[in-house]
Image (tube, coloured by chain):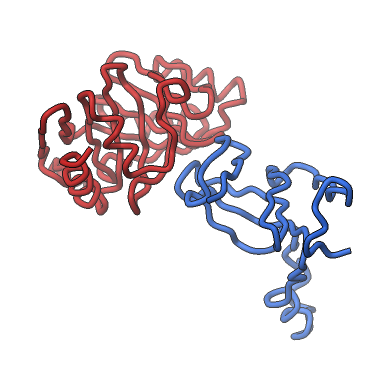
Amino acid sequence: MFIINCPYCGDRDQTEFSCHGEAHIPRPTETAQMSDDAWGNYVFFRTNPKGYHRERWLHTHGCRRWFNALRHTVTDEFVTTYKIEDPRPPLPTESQTSSDGRQS
Amino acid sequence: MANPVIATPLNEADFSIDGFSVAELDYSGKINLRADFESKHANQSLTKLLGIDCQLAPNTYKTSGDTSVFWLGPNERLVYTNGDVDAMVSQWRNKAGCAAVDVSDYSSVLKLSGPKARDVIASGTPFDIHPEVFSVGDCTQTRFGNATILLSNHSEAPEFQIQVRWSFAEYVFEYIKRVARYV
């Protein structure tokens, strides 16, 4: 079980949350001119890293607000969570973390 | 026009066992408010209409007379009132620059009391309800079994209230009845 820090409510149990994939993917604006390839990339293709990953999370059973989290996809370590409008926090440096499975 | 039938999902059922009792509260009006409560203008006009300052700390509620305001999110509040909900909603919508929705029929409110109340709640929720971290005046939205609830602490006696969506009311009530026999 994890404890996840909701930026609005504080530390809460993992089961109150749901994860909704990669964060910071802007919706295209010039949709009429987009090629099928570009649409396909926007809709289906994700970076899927082995390592630190910025994700969208929803506090489903709590305040029902969306926020972003910086999580390690192998160790499941939550580095930080931040509000949608906040600047992206930097990735942790090598010395701050175990090297297990981390993408270099 | 609004449906004049006033009902609650459990017909105000209750259940008691040694050291614990649970009862569904009478029907009361509920209004969901969405506004920028940080803005002085919106907050002032709402405070004037409600008689309660809507600028709440996260996960707390305030009560004055028969009106309570619960924090649901940074820009969302829930009001319990016995007043005329229709009149309040139209008044607030026009004057306070906020979205007000009558949600009186969305949910059921259960009152849990008795020395075992804490143990009963702890059996269904991952949220820490120890008095040091969840005291009187605190509320939180969390999970109880598979249902989403709004849990609030009303007395050190102890007394808690659980607000649950209409369709989950029976599930939560039966869950509580069952665990109350074992805690």
Image point (19%, 41%), residue name: B182
The answer to which image quadrant residue B31 occupies is: top left
> From this viewpoint, is residue B86 visible?
no
Point out the residue furthest to the bottom here.
Answer: A36
Q: How many marks?
A: 0
Q: Is residue B29 left or right of residue A15?
A: left
Q: Quadrant of residue A71?
A: bottom right
Q: Residue A30: percent from the left, percent from the top?
A: 78, 70
Residue at 75% of width from left, 62% of height from top? Answer: A26
A76 or A99: nearer the eye?
A99
Q: Chain A is which colour? A: blue
Q: Position of residue A47 (x, y in %)?
A: 77, 70
Comparing A104 with B77, the one in front is A104
Q: Does A100 sit above or below residue A5?
A: below
Residue pictured at 48% horizontal, 52% vertical? A15
Q: Position of residue B127 (x, y in %)?
A: 43, 38
* Front residue of this view, candidates B131 and A37: B131
The quadrant of the image that shows the C terminus of chain A is bottom right
Rendered view: B74 above or below A78 = above
Asked if residue B32 shows in the view, the reply is yes
Q: Which quadrant of the structure image shows residue A8?
A: top right
Q: Residue at x 74, y 70 (%)?
A: A48
Q: Position of residue B12 (x, y in %)?
A: 11, 38
Q: Colour of chain B?
A: red
